[in-house]
Amino acid sequence: MTKWTQAVHAGKGTPWPKSRPTVQPIYQTSVFSFNSLEAVDEAFSGDEGAFVYSRYGNPGLQVLEQALAQLEGGEAALVASSGMASITSAVLSLCGAGDHIITTQDLYGGTQVLFSREMSRFGIEVSFLDVTQAYRIEEAIKPNTKVLFVETISNPLMKVVDLAALVAIKRGYGLYLLVDNTFASPLVCRPLEYGVDLVLESLTKYINGHSDVTGGAVVGSKEIIDRIRPLHINMGGVPSPFDCWLVMRGLKTLPLRMKQHCSNALLVAEFLATQPGVTHVHYPGLPGHPHYKLAQRQMSAYGGMLSFVVAGGCYAADKVIRRLKLVEFVPSLAGVATTISHPAKTSHRGMTSFDRAKLGIDDGMIRVSVGIEDPEDICADFEQALRND
Ligand SMILES: Cc1ncc(COP(=O)(O)O)c(C=O)c1O
């Protein structure tokens, strides 16, 4: 069965004796009742289909976890109340005081803060470096290094990590390799197929796709997910039954949406590259991108995210933002509508202009989450906003 068919037919719901609803109902309950001690014992021993309390599990949550495991090509999944909750549960289950994590220097801002500010309070040390250079990782590995944490496509430079190279390193040094696949989605890249240990997704983004839910997921082998689940339940970052239902609903159109996001993004990237005042376009689908060949090998398309730089820094970027009519400035991504963000004033505002420049993040950079509208309308809006009058 292909990913398209899997997404449409995922989560048909719990079997009913004679007929069943075509859509999994929402079990909007915090707790379940029992008619005997034997039934309680069975539920607590993890009997399939027996639920106790919605923080431990709920039918809607279970169906979503099964659907995501199938879509990512993993044995099991754990769904959390946000992408950050899924990262926290995964990392804290694998690392403890005295351990060391290696991650990328252009990590998503929220994860960067979690790693740099919060993990040190738990005695976990984190090194940030350019993970596209394999030798830099090997140089940074120490006896206490436990986890290598990367993103399939980085923000906002859209760098692509070489999963096969990272898997070779993690195998060589006995590390866990965790990949945040939020910018790609399982329709564009399936990191588990390369041998990574865990794939993480912010469901808030492409997988739900309608900008109305926060959620996160971790997918991998049953053994690792079983290891993460107790900590996750105890930390309490679980999603509501309604949010699980909304993500299930969004998931059914993920293949269609991704197809349109990706084809639109390529057209918009090519268009922006021709515009006066645009000095650079970062999109892995453009032949000039440093990871164009890698993206061709590793991804089924180039994704729906890009960024471009206008000459003139913040002042010029602000002018474009103010003039856009259709495209809104929204500090998130991956919804059906095209939106923009300004890394220097949002995700990377904690850095100095000098440090941003060292990473290649210009103050005139605008990040675009290309939506599923008619691409001509998206390009027309950028054209009028970039016009020099
Ligand atoms: C790449 C990436 N990972 C993780 C997250 C965190 O997800 P959430 O906001 O659902 O906690 C985000 C949010 O923007 C993200 O862009």
Image (cartoon, rainbow, N blue to C red):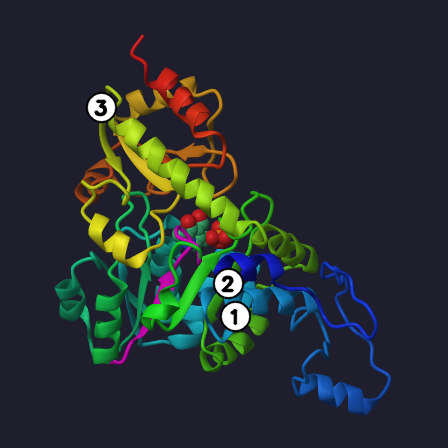
Whether 85 is drawn above or below 94: the answer is: above
> Given contact means CB atoms under 8 Å apart, are the residues at marks 2 and 1 in contact?
yes
Query: Is the C-beta of the residue carrying label 3 under 8 Å from the nearest atom of ligand 1?
Result: no
Q: Who is closer to the viewer here, 257 or 327?
A: 257
Secondary-structure class at tag 3:
loop
- In terms of sequence position, does the residue under pointer 1 or pointer 3 come before the other? 1
Q: Position of residue 112 (x, y in %)?
A: 35, 54
Whether 313 is drawn above or below 87: the answer is: above
Q: Residues within 10 Å of mark 3 (few under 14, many from 20)?
A: some
Kind of residue indicated by mark 1:
Ala
Whether 149 is drawn above or below 285: the answer is: below
Q: Residue at x 72, y 73 (%)?
A: 53
> In the figure, is residue 329 to the left or right of 120?
right
- In terms of sequence position, does the residue under pointer 2 or pointer 3 come before the other? 2
Q: Who is closer to the viewer here, 258 or 324?
A: 258
Q: Which residue is mark 1?
A: 77
Between disc 1 and disc 3, the foreground one is 1
Q: Main secondary structure of the magenta part?
A: loop
Q: Which residue is mark 2?
A: 217
Kind of residue indicated by mark 2:
Ala
Q: Which residue is mark 3?
A: 311
Q: Which residues are magenta?
A: 174-186
CA–CA distance in space, label 2 to label 1: 7 Å
- For this orientation, the residue located farthest to the bottom is 38
- For this orientation, the residue located farthest to the right is 35
Secondary-structure class at tag 1:
strand
CA–CA distance in space, label 2 to label 3: 38 Å
Q: Residues within 10 Å of mark 1 (few under 14, many from 20)?
A: many
CA–CA distance in space, label 1 to label 3: 44 Å
Q: Residues within 10 Å of mark 2 (few under 14, many from 20)?
A: many
Kind of residue indicated by mark 3:
Ala
